[in-house]
């Protein structure tokens, strides 16, 4: 292993060895404050780390700050100020494991720890993380609270920054899967921004250093995921912490983890974050970023919201050819851990210049809304009797629901007053007195994505709650 960190090392050695440093966190990314605390507690007796309580959330959950290294350059990294954006928080736990116990990469670790003093705040919004919500428990978007500092979490973050006085700051987020790299149709899997310090978007010395460091990191990613690196919009937002910290003198870098094919848990993006953290920290420690100009930064295409989870093209709807864009939205099952997905039609029309993670060419097919299976229908499991959801689960499951879809059904009526705007174990949408979501039968934006795709009298494909159903091959996926 070479003493210097080369692109080849990061392209070959680190991906091959990543499993050694990947922390034990729930793979579905819907983990809570307790999971992070459990990992941090293991490091409290390590001489490598100094762990302090920076403050507490509205609900009195601890906000931890971890210090490592002895270098002159101070680096502050914080994540999950939005509770539903856990990718970088997971990668920071991987980074701690790498710093604690390297084998093949000892020289690289030592270079980082001798060159920088690293401060990590892995979970700024623990109450939001508990509920998997963007905002804190009081409904405050912490990244719009840098001026008012109305929430304790915001005050903790600002106080930590003022005490640390970092030379470099990493502002770590997730972004929606709808973001594309310019007009390329490719997902913006990782996006960067050196946020402006003012309305004029002045390129101060610290902002220029941020741009140079982004150029260094992006160069590596262009080899790993070519065409999937974007630049986040640089509109000035004085209420945002990234813009504020840039104006306060830290070379501040925003990193947004976006979509990658159908990796909904974003585990690949987590690995990319881990690798780019090492590249970035090593570059700061050695000054490697200084060799770059800012041209590479401005050459990154700006993000645009041009992607859908599903895009149905050349659909024949009411006698006209149109396209339909469908997106899936995560819905937290709180206090039960985990989520369900709500699939909604986002747009209907020509949709030129738009792309999808999954695209379905519907030329020659007829598109229509799915039907609701009611008591009295020959296929209704209860005959004329309206059954409860628990009873229907005994009759309809993933092994046999395709025969209902073949007949054009995407919904089923159940007894009771419970709303169906929630998770159900049934593979069809439930419809009840208070849950008539499946009865919105027009294919228009904002409506549930419950769609039958047929040719002649045969149903070949369908969407149920935004999940694509291949009736012919008997499989489905988000």
Image: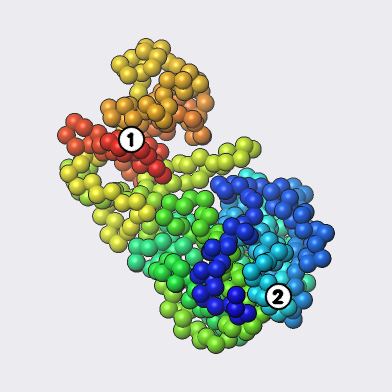
Give above or below for 455 relative to 42: above
Q: Position of residue 131 (x, y in %)?
A: 63, 45
Who is closer to the viewer here, 227 or 325?
227
**Placement of the N terminus among the 4 image quadrants:** bottom right
Residue 188 at x, y percent in the picture: 44, 64
Q: Residues within 10 Å of mark 2 (few under 14, many from 20)?
A: some
Residue 449 seen anywhere in this rendered image of the structure: no
Image quadrant of residue 158?
bottom right
What residue appears at the point 67 percent right and 54 percent down from the top-left corner?
125
Q: Position of residue 157 (x, y in %)?
A: 71, 64
Q: Which residue is mark 1?
A: 474
Q: Is residue 294 above or below residue 19?
A: below
Q: Report if residue 11 is visible in the image.
A: yes
Nearest the camera: 143 or 361?
Answer: 361
Q: Give 237 or 107, whichever is nearer the viewer.
A: 107
Q: Are marks 1 and 2 in contact (CB under 8 Å)?
A: no
- What residue appears at the point 64 percent right and 83 percent down from the top-left corner? 286
Report helix, strand or loop for mark 2: helix
Q: Is tag 1's residue or tag 2's residue first in the polypeptide sequence?
A: 2
Q: Secondary structure at mark 1?
A: loop
Question: Which disc is residue 110 wearing?
Answer: 2
């Amino acid at each position: 292993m070479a003493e210097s960190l080369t692109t080849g090392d990061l392209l070959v050695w680190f991906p091959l060895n990543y499993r050694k440093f990947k922390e034990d966190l729930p793979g579905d990314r819907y983990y809570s404050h307790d999971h992070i605390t459990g990992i941090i507690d293991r490091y409290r007796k390590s001489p490598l780390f100094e762990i302090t309580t920076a403050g507490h959330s509205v609900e009195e959950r601890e906000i931890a700050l971890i210090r490592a290294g002895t270098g002159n350059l101070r680096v502050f990294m914080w994540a999950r100020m939005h509770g539903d954006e856990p990718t970088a928080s997971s990668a920071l736990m991987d980074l701690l494991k790498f710093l604690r116990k390297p084998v093949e990469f000892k020289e690289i670790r030592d270079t980082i720890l001798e060159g920088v003093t690293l401060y990590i705040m892995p979970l700024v919004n623990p109450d939001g993380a508990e509920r998997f919500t963007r905002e804190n428990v009081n409904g405050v978007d912490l990244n719009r609270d840098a001026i008012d500092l109305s929430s304790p979490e915001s005050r903790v973050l600002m106080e930590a920054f003022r005490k640390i006085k970092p030379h470099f700051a990493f502002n770590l987020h997730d972004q929606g899967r709808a973001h594309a790299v310019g007009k390329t149709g490719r997902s913006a899997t990782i996006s960067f921004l050196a946020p402006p310090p003012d309305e004029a978007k002045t390129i101060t010395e610290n902002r220029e250093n941020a741009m140079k460091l982004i150029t260094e990191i992006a160069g590596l990613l262009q080899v790993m995921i070519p065409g999937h690196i974007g630049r986040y919009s640089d509109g000035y937002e004085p209420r945002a912490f990234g813009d504020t910290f840039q104006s306060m003198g830290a070379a501040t870098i925003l990193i947004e983890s976006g979509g990658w094919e159908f990796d909904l848990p974003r585990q690949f993006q987590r690995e990319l974050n881990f690798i780019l953290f090492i590249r970035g920290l090593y570059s700061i420690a050695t000054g490697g970023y200084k060799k770059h100009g800012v041209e590479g930064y401005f050459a990154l295409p700006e993000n645009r919201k041009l992607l859908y989870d599903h895009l149905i093209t050349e659909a024949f709807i009411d006698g006209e050819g149109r396209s339909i864009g469908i997106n899936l939205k995560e819905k937290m099952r709180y206090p039960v851990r985990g989520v369900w997905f709500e699939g909604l039609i986002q747009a209907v029309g020509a949709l030129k210049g738009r792309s999808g993670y999954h695209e379905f060419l519907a030329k020659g097919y007829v598109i229509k809304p799915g039907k609701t299976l009611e008591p009295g229908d020959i296929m209704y499991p209860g005959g004329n009797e309206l059954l409860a959801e628990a009873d229907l689960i005994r009759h309809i499951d993933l092994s046999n629901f395709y025969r209902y879809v073949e007949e054009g059904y995407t919904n089923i009526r159940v007894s009771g007053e419970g709303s169906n705007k929630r998770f159900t174990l049934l593979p069809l949408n439930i419809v009840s007195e208070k849950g008539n979501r499946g009865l919105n039968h027009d294919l228009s934006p904002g409506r549930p994505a419950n769609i039958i795709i047929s040719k002649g009298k045969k149903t070949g494909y369908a969407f149920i709650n935004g999940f694509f159903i291949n009736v012919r091959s008997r499989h489905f996926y988000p």
